[in-house]
Image (spheres, helix red, strand yellow):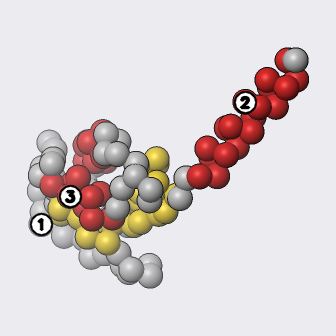
């Protein structure tokens, strides 16, 4: 009986994992990221957006890579999520480089 219950539980978990439609989008932000505080502000605010599974930031490249469940949210909703904490974001295409703005001051200091 225990084997049947375990098999059933594993089947349910596998079906749930396969049902997710995970997508990835790479964005850049305004203001740009300058420090660990900037990264933390982005990660701590976006993690509450529905459907977001993973957030990776890269200060050197000025990118935020977001993995999300496309069944629960859209790129447009993710971009709107940045506005909630006074950032704006735009989607980068095909390894598009981002020019850094050395004159911009860190908003999170």
Q: Quadrant of the C terminus?
A: top left
Q: Which mark is in front, 1 or 3?
A: 3
Q: Circle 3 sits on which residue?
A: 80
The answer to whether 24 appears left or right of 12 in the picture is: left
Residue 51, horizontal then vertical, whole percent: 40, 48
Q: In the image shown, does 85 or 100 lie closer to the viewer?
A: 85
- Crowdedness near tag 2: few (<14), some (14–19) or many (≥20) residues, C-alpha within 10 Å: few
Q: Earlier in the sequence, mark 1 or mark 2?
A: 2
- Crowdedness near tag 3: few (<14), some (14–19) or many (≥20) residues, C-alpha within 10 Å: some
Q: Earlier in the sequence, mark 1 or mark 3?
A: 3
- Which residue is at 12% across, 52% downward? 86
- Which residue is at 19% across, 70% downward? 101
The answer to whether 32 appears left or right of 40 in the picture is: left
Residue 6, horizontal then vertical, whole percent: 80, 26
Q: Which mark is in front, 2 or 3?
A: 2
Secondary structure at badge 3 equals: helix
Secondary structure at badge 1 equals: loop
- Which residue is at 35% across, 75% downward? 92
Q: Circle 1 sits on which residue?
A: 103
Q: Circle 2 sits on which residue?
A: 9
């Amino acid at each position: 009986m225990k084997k049947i219950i375990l098999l059933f539980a594993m089947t349910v978990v596998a079906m749930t994992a396969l049902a997710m439609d995970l997508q990835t989008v790479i964005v850049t932000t305004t203001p740009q990221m300058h420090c660990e505080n900037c990264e933390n502000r982005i990660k701590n605010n976006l993690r509450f957006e529905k459907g977001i599974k993973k957030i990776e930031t890269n200060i050197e490249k000025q990118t935020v890579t977001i993995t999300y469940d496309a069944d629960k949210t859209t790129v447009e909703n993710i971009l709107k999520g940045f506005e909630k904490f006074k950032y704006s974001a735009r989607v980068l295409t095909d390894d598009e480089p981002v020019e850094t703005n050395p004159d911009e001051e860190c908003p999170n200091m």
